[in-house]
Image (tube, coloured by chain):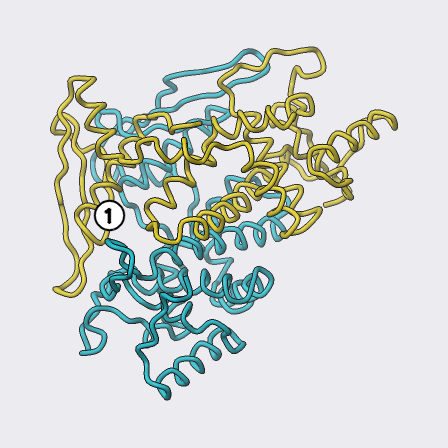
Chain colours: A yellow, B cyan
Amino acid sequence: MRSFFRFRLGNSERKKFKRSVEHIIGEAPSNVGLYQLAFRHTSASKETAIKGFKESNERLEYLGDAVLGMVIAEFLFKKFPYKDEGFLTEIRSRIVNRETLNGIARKIGLENLIEYDGSRNRGIVPSRTSMYGDALEALVGAIYLDKGFRFTRRFILKELLGHYDLEALISNNANFKSRLIEWAQREGKKVEFIIISERGNNHFREFISQVTVNDEPFAQGSGYSKKKAEQSAAEKACEQLQMKPVSN
Amino acid sequence: MRSFFRFRLGNSERKKFKRSVEHIIGEAPSNVGLYQLAFRHTSASKETAIKGFKESNERLEYLGDAVLGMVIAEFLFKKFPYKDEGFLTEIRSRIVNRETLNGIARKIGLENLIEYDGSRNRGIVPSRTSMYGDALEALVGAIYLDKGFRFTRRFILKELLGHYDLEALISNNANFKSRLIEWAQREGKKVEFIIISERGNNHFREFISQVTVNDEPFAQGSGYSKKKAEQSAAEKACEQLQMKPVSN
């Protein structure tokens, strides 16, 4: 894989880039090419020797997303020993939501490092793009490959989580059912929850809940109780409606 | 947290349990209580000293799911250096899908360790439940807390991935769009893809695709190309239709 990373940068540019990365991650990078790749948006992706395979930060983003998700999962698991998995899942999704990550990426200074089509001639980046958040995840992937798990975990806990106001994040309404109902009232729609299936026996049940909007099936969810099934269905409905996840 | 783990087991039972765990994970467990919790299904959850907080394996499942997801992400990232993130994401979701995990859980012998309402009096577990897969994820969470990252990663790569036929998993159809179209043909429905929004400028675009079923909006997805947006919308539609993820 190593042969892939093409150092287009001149020597002094490369030193500058290396210093910038060092400033962000707190240690000199060993494999600079990984970080260059992390900041290469798909619009600036490069053909490789493998036909049809263009290289951009998307693979690193996939890896970084998984590493970030796991480190945050552990952090929340330990921080909230008496909260159930529904709470932990919801708070994690708020922490890693695209808009929040975009904001953090700017705060830690990724803006000027990202290479995209137009970045060399001051192309304007549309403000709604998720480019910065994507690059932040890719950076986490690069750090993981370059420095290993412990280093990456410390980076996430120290350098990224420090930018969050956890309390504010938590106090936002995590109740998808009530968010959905509020939405319906605002939009003049009728929302209903129906349990459409139950599996199991006396000891052991799983429910499937369906949300209908104006009597049309809209989303489904499942859970070990009716309430959980409804929350899960409501969550999916909120996703589909692209209700903005709450950011701090 | 430690005070939570109640050792209801007698001394010889406890030794037996410990040996079973050792047999599965390949090393004697240090914190046996963690593993007992991992195998405690929500139907056998216990009230704790904290009012309203019942303890079962659901929190460990949340943690284990994240650890498993990350280890598999890294494994695929390294195994397939020339595959894009869409492929990696899809194959990972096949590896960690609930039914497949259920099967692996039985293969490694979790069946007899799980405590659920009825397990003491031979209650019958409905075959469609995800209890085994959930317990397997919880076990991964317990191993992580008990033994750390490296050990857990090795366990996943050696003990779990060994049960997969990766080639068979990959050769299944990952193309959500064509799966959705096949479904529509089977069911006599009309499926269409519409690009309902484009953001960005010349350098930089993001598309939103909507799937309609019989002219009704059904699911949405976004991506940096029309094709990716459509795949993403089709994937969400397949999820909503609860199309079975492919297992080996």
Residue A143 located left or right of residue A129: right
Where A28 sits versus B106, above or below?
above
Point out the image quarter for the N terminus of chain B. bottom left
- The residue shown at (39%, 53%) is A81
Picture mark count: 1
Bin the neighbour count of mark 1 within 10 Å (Cα to Cα): few under 14, some 14-19, many 20 and up.
Answer: many
Which residue was labeled with disc 1? A222
Residue B2 located left or right of residue B211: right
**Which element carries disc 1, helix, strand or loop?**
strand
The answer, for residue A176, to whether it is visible in the render is yes
**Front residue (pair B75, B218):** B75
The spot of residue A213 in percent (x, y) is 17, 28
Name the chain letter of the residue that bears numbered label 1. A
- Residue B65, by quadrant, is bottom left
The spot of residue B243 in percent (x, y) is 30, 46
**Front residue (pair A176, B47):** B47
- Residue B10, by quadrant, is bottom left
Point out the image quarter for the C terminus of chain B. bottom left
Residue B54 located left or right of residue B38: left
